Structure formats: structure tokens, C-alpha cells
Image: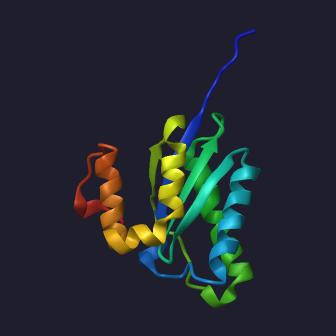
Amino acid sequence: MAQSFTNLIYHIVFSTKNRQPLIVEPVRNRLYDYCGGIIRKLGGVSLAINGMPDHLHVLAKLRPDKSLSSVLRDLKANSSGWMHDVFPEVRDFRWQNGYGAFTVSASQIERVRRYIENQEKHHRKIGSFRDEFIGLLKANQIEFDERYLLI
């Protein structure tokens, strides 16, 4: 019997609506855990989740029978609803439309995991989310028009 073999690993990046800095303590770690749970519920494996007050990085292995866009739709919708239920004081919390998703080879998992885990240190050097996101697009050779970036 023929089998299919996949190793679909993604570095996914998305921001809060208008990059509002709403992912702060005590919200942050609980949000990361909740997002990891959503990925597990969808059959994926969360390898790393971290970010800054205005954006999130996710390193995850996803199933081949789930499209990346449907995983992101469910992840954003469920986590946003959860935030409103659990942290009503952040009633303005929303995710920005769109995202960046970059494939990661198995040999690069640890490098990307360290990058995600060291977000605060990284942002002291690189600065804004916009600069970081443009750097990721360029590093992944993705063409873009700065006028249409949602960052």
C-alpha cells in the first residue's frame, strides 16, 4: 500500500490589529499556551510560540490535510474569542488580517526556535515589527510592495 510522508514545518508570524501592544503580562504566557492547544487540537505540533506585545511567532508542524490558511483562520478566531472571554479588560484585542508563513527545513528547526525564543533580545537590535517582517520576507525571497504590507 502506498503511503504519503510529509514534514510540513512553518514559521508563522502575525500581528495584533493596528499593532496594538496588547500581548503583555498576565496575558502573554496564557495566550501562548492557548495557541499551542489550538494547534494540537487541529492535529499539529507547536514547536515554539513567542512574540512581542504587538505580534506573535509560531513554529509548528502541521498536518497535510489541513490548509495553512484554515489553521490560521481557526487559530486567530479561537484565540481572539478566548482573549475576550478570559481577559475582558483587553476588549480591543483583535488580530490583523493576513500573516507571513515561511517553510522551515528539519535541519533549521533549532535555529528558528532560538530566533523565536529570543524575540526580546532580537527586537532590541532590529527595532520594529515592520523591519523584522520585511527582513523575513527578503530572507525568504518573497516579493512584496511596501504599500500593501499590513504592518
Say whether residue 34 is left or right of residue 128.
Answer: right
Does residue 147 appear to the left or right of 121 in the view shown?
left
Query: Horizontal and vertical percent for residue 99?
Result: 45, 57
Give coordinates of residue 73: x percent, y percent.
59, 56
Quadrant location, the C terminus: bottom left
**Most extreme residue toward the top, as rendered?**
1
Residue shown at 57%/36% (left/top)?
8
For the N terminus, the image quarter is top right
| Residue 105 in sight from this viewpoint | no
Between residue 114 and residue 80, name the one nearer to us.
114
Which residue lies most toward the bottom here? Answer: 89
Tally the marks: 0
The residue at the point 47 percent across, 67 percent down is 119
* x and y percentages locating residue 81 in the rendered image: 68, 72
* Residue 114 visible in the snapshot: yes
Residue at 28% in and 61% down: 148
